[in-house]
Amino acid sequence: MTENSVYDVIIIGGGPAGLTAGLYAARARLNVLLLEQMGFGGQLLTYEKVDNYPGFPEGIGAFGLAELISAQALRFGLQVRNAEVLSLDLTDKIKTIILADSVLRARTVILATGAAPNKLGVKGETELTGRGVSYCAVCDAPFYRDQEVAVVGGGDTAIEEAVYLTKFAAKVHVVHRRERLRATPVIQEKAFDNEKISFILCSVVTEIQGSRQGVCGLELRDTRDSAVSVLPVSGVFMFVGIKPNSKIIPPVVERDEAGFICTDKEMATSVPGVFAAGDIRVKALRQIVTAVGDGATAAFNAGRYIESNF
Ligand code: NAP
């Protein structure tokens, strides 16, 4: 392919959704390029183990699963490029993708840029990120061997990561703003059975305390009686939901109020020839298994769109 050629499909994002779109598009003999700015796997790489992806009765390491999916896509001829997309022009029939060193063109685009962890937005969070405030247990848990840490949030990510952290930390305090956790019961049960985990419910973090040496505590407010207390911990892991990676996505692509992309059941967005797959789109169940389904559907419908329009 020369820089002036037009790809059938350009996929932006190399997580499970993007890689599976690449696998299906390449296997359908479309001329397809996947752009990824980091490594293959997306958010998968921030987890240790995947327990609910079919076909692996004992679970599978997250990194290993990302490698398997990418190897399968590459076997069918998916072209990949390690590059950051700076901007997109999706208004014309041929779409334009601007990289730092080149301009690419494609008949269809599949947006699979995924999502990233939310910040809590409290005093101390920004200053102490990397000095005790973390958004990735797999990345940072080994720094907290035999220490006390806190996890903020009550969803699947928070509770699964709290369990993971007990492999290293002496004690993991889960701080959740409500009386009930949001996480799936099977995930909750694992945490309730773990003696190293304690739950501080109906409590919100009002400040992260620390210095250049690191975090030393969390100021908490009990939502029932407004009592303020300090929880001494040397690390805090934030898992308070996700936000879409939508910085490069132009306003012409319709989104919901939180910024996730609206699609129909064919993964088509409001812009003809532009599809979305995985965590970036509006959906009820954000899982690897639904991301790969989205990717396959988006690639299939990108192929159909090309057949009818070119
Ligand atoms: P999530 O389900 O949106 O949960 C976010 C948690 O953070 C909730 O407990 C929420 O409290 C809390 N929270 C949000 N904003 C807060 C704030 N400002 N202050 C304090 N607490 C706050 O997010 P997630 O756990 O990252 O999961 C994202 C998606 O991935 C979900 O669809 C989840 O099912 C999926 N996932 C699945 C698995 C799995 O199946 N193994 C693993 C990880 C993630 P409230 O409960 O009060 O709203």
Image: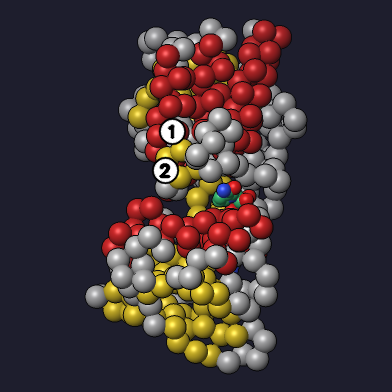
Viewer can see residue 24? yes
Residue 47 place in picture, x, y as percent: 44, 48
Q: Residue at x 58, y 72 (%)?
A: 176
Q: Amino acid at mark 2?
A: Leu
Frontmost residue, 202 versus 81: 202
Above or below: residue 151 compared with residue 221: above
Frontmost residue, 22 versus 164: 164
Residue 233 place in picture, x, y as percent: 38, 77
Frontmost residue, 68 versus 32: 68
Q: Residue at x 52, y 29 (%)?
A: 18
Circles 2 and 1 in contact, beta carbons < 8 Å: yes
Image quadrant assignment for residue 182: bottom right
Above or below: residue 87 compared with residue 244: above
Q: Residue at x 72, y 26 (%)?
A: 266
Quarter that holds the N terminus: top left
Q: CA distance from mark 2 to mark 1?
A: 8 Å
Above or below: residue 201 compared with residue 106: below
Query: Please, which residue is most extreme toward the right here?
Result: 265
